[in-house]
Amino acid sequence: MTRTPLRPLARILDARARGENPDVIERENIRRRHEEMRDHSRARAETRLLVMGLAFFCAFSVIGLRMGVMAGSEGEEPRTARAGVASQIVPTRAEIVDRRGRILATNMETSALYAHPHQMIEPERAAKELAKIFPELDAETLTRRFTTPGSKFYWIRRTLSPEQRQQVHDIGEPGLHFGPREMRLYPNGPIAAHILGGSTFDNEGTRWAEIKGSAGLEHAFDERLRDPAKAGQPLRLSLDLTVQAALEQVLAGGMSLMKAKGAAAVLMDVNTGEVVAMASLPDFDPNDRPHNPTSGHPDDSPLFNRAVQGVYELGSVFKAFTIAQVLEEGIATPDTVIDIRGPIRWGRFSISDDHYLGTETDVREILVESSNIGTARLAQKIGPERQQVFLRRLGMMETVPLEIAEASSADPRTQSNWSELTTMTVSYGHGMSVSLAHVAAAYAAIANGGRLLKPTLLRRDTPPEGTRVMSEGTSATLRQMLREVVTEGTASFGDVEGYEVGGKTGTANKLRPSGGYYEDKTIATFASIFPASDPRYTLILMLDEPETHIYGMDRRTAGWTAVPVAAEVIRRIAPLLGLRPAVEPVSAADITLTSN
């Protein structure tokens, strides 16, 4: 039986006297008492939570302070010298893309690997396992590092692949630690390696690292690329990745076929000055950039950029500049006849032609048949002072203002005493050394109507005005003559059906370090423009010490080596550049009617 608690009589009587229902009043009183009990319980619970929270806070503060003290004792762990660097990965470095927005350089989150030897349990086993994962590491060296008394910190690897990280994790050694980091990634491997250059880590610690450009555009635009305000704005280049890859592929094949020591090429838009492709071989992978050489000749290293760093005597490609000057200054016309009897003797030196051309010929044939004697005679008419002035106008007397630092080291080399003999030899490309980039800019001026443009590796939205260095008339005449060099002269292997290639060959014996020239080592060059009737591009291609065996003879001249390689390059890249092959006009006599 359930008992109902008795209610105080006084309260019942008072309620009835007021005309109220005692049961309702009692239920209301019970509700109020329950609410008071709940409020009291809630207050007690909140008080307990507050006390527990304070206890946890104090405990973790003590632990954090202790960890800080321990970290402070790690004197060998790298630290930043720059204030304000975050404890995690620093702001992302801007990407580098080609003219169409395709990625050339980007970033990837990865890990660094380091050791706290004093925390290691099995240092010898860890060293052996690490040597298996990273073949370049020596187990004995690692063991010594890990077991040296007092050793507290040791870098093992600055970057790890996800697979390597997992393998290290599986070793199970508590003294091995990972740190977050961002590394520079070049997804196309060696393609455009000499242009991009490479990068390394600058300021770094176990929990962060800052990427720094070490060469090429990565170095030239380092500030802009690492600027946090521009992290989302890629650096857009003038390069076309597809064209660059095709150029490198053909150049590598040609270098191998011609047994050359090295090769280089520059492809430039003659109307904008944009470098669409540039290659130097041998090359390297910027993802695993080799160390700078400490001995030997600089161009023995794959890091050496033959296209902009190397300066060479390039031979007869200079004849186009000599012809341009005599036409521009009214010294001669294409039909002016020149005495080419030789050799020309000057002290102990003599100037002769590669093949007999008779006793006289006109200026057009001097270029088409590449007469050294004829060009030297024209240079005598120009004179030393005027020749230097004209070459300076073409940009041949100073470094090429290209964005990469390597270009600034390519100072043209000339004779200290610019004599009449120097004037004659320079007229056909001897006695003066320049880079391929110099020649590309000058041939672009010949092709575009006479305007010298500042070359660039960056995308240009608006073509520059340039500086006029010759008239449009001189430019047009010279373009036609360069076309005849291919159709009738020394560059016959350079003709590419439908693309009207014009150009000039150049072969020069290499200089000996001790003085004089090698008899069997040459630099073979072909400086070309295409299409000759309405030029869009110039391609300068060079082979270093080529040699091929044709018709029972060793061939080292450009006509046999550089020219056919350049022709194959143009054949491959012209469609990629959007150039449609022109249909050669056919005369009525060539048409044959047939009936079905």
Image (cartoon, rainbow, N blue to C red):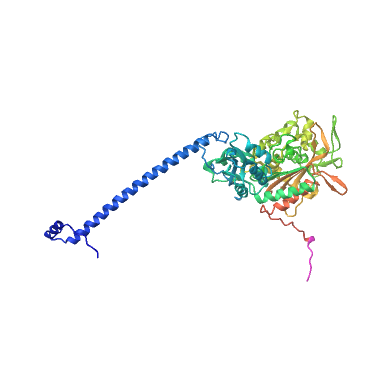
- Image quadrant in which you'd find residue 177: top right
On the rendered structure, is 271 left or right of 558?
left
The answer to whether residue 155 is visible is yes
In this rendering, the answer to whether 325 lies above or below 171 is: above
Residue 122 percent location from the top left of the image: 62, 42
On the rendered structure, is 170 left or right of 371?
left
Residue at (34% x, 48% y) in the render: 46
User: Total marks drawn?
Assistant: 0
The answer to whether residue 468 is visible is no
In the orientation shown, which residue stands out farthest toward the front?
A: 1
- In magenta, the rendered stretch is 589-596
- Image quadrant in which you'd find residue 546: top right
Residue 87 percent location from the top left of the image: 52, 40
- 505 magenta-colored: no
Q: Foreground: 286 or 119?
A: 119
Residue 265 percent location from the top left of the image: 72, 44
In the orientation shown, which residue stands out farthest toward the right?
A: 552
